[in-house]
Amino acid sequence: MQVGLMTQEEGGMMALPTDWIVAKELQIRGSFGMQPHRYKDLLVMVERGKLHSEKLISKTISLEEASGILESMPQYGTLGFVVINRF
């Protein structure tokens, strides 16, 4: 399960379905990202086909569309990673 950062208004607090988490025996781990010294290992995993980064990408957009995506983020208008690939 991946849980994102909360807004300042939420103060880092969120409700989670604990009955479901226990029933499914899920683990929740916190992370603030990957340390730069691990990037090489990450890219090797992608290169060897062990990590399928394309599954994380929900949408590719042009640079002109970026402002609309940024504006939708406070209302949780995005899912996965949006990648700018047209300039």
Image: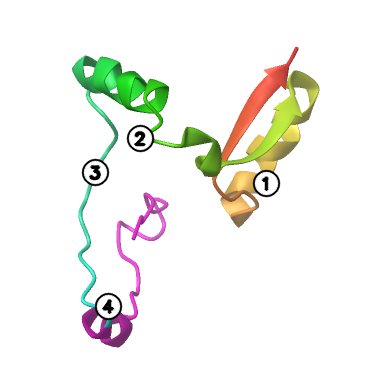
Q: Residue at x 67, y 46 (%)?
A: 72
Helix, strand or loop at label 4? It is: helix
Q: Residue at x 77, y 29 (%)?
A: 65
**Residue 50, numbered label:** 2
**Quick one: label 4, few (<14), some, or many (20+) residues within 10 Å?**
few
The residue that disc 1 covers is 72
Q: What is the C-alpha distance between the residues marked 3 and 4?
A: 18 Å
Q: Position of residue 12 (x, y in %)?
A: 30, 57
> Comparing marks 1 and 3, which lies closer to the viewer?
3
What segment is highlighted magenta in the picture?
1-23
Q: Position of residue 2 (x, y in %)?
A: 36, 55
Return the disc, 1 or 3, that comes first in the chain's sequence: 3
**Quick one: label 2, few (<14), some, or many (20+) residues within 10 Å?**
few
Q: Amino acid at mark 3?
A: Ser
Proximity of marks 3 and 2: CB atoms separated by less than 8 Å: no
Return the disc, 2 or 4, that comes first in the chain's sequence: 4
Q: What is the C-alpha distance between the residues marked 2 and 4?
A: 27 Å
In this view, 35 is above or below 7: above
Helix, strand or loop at label 3? It is: loop
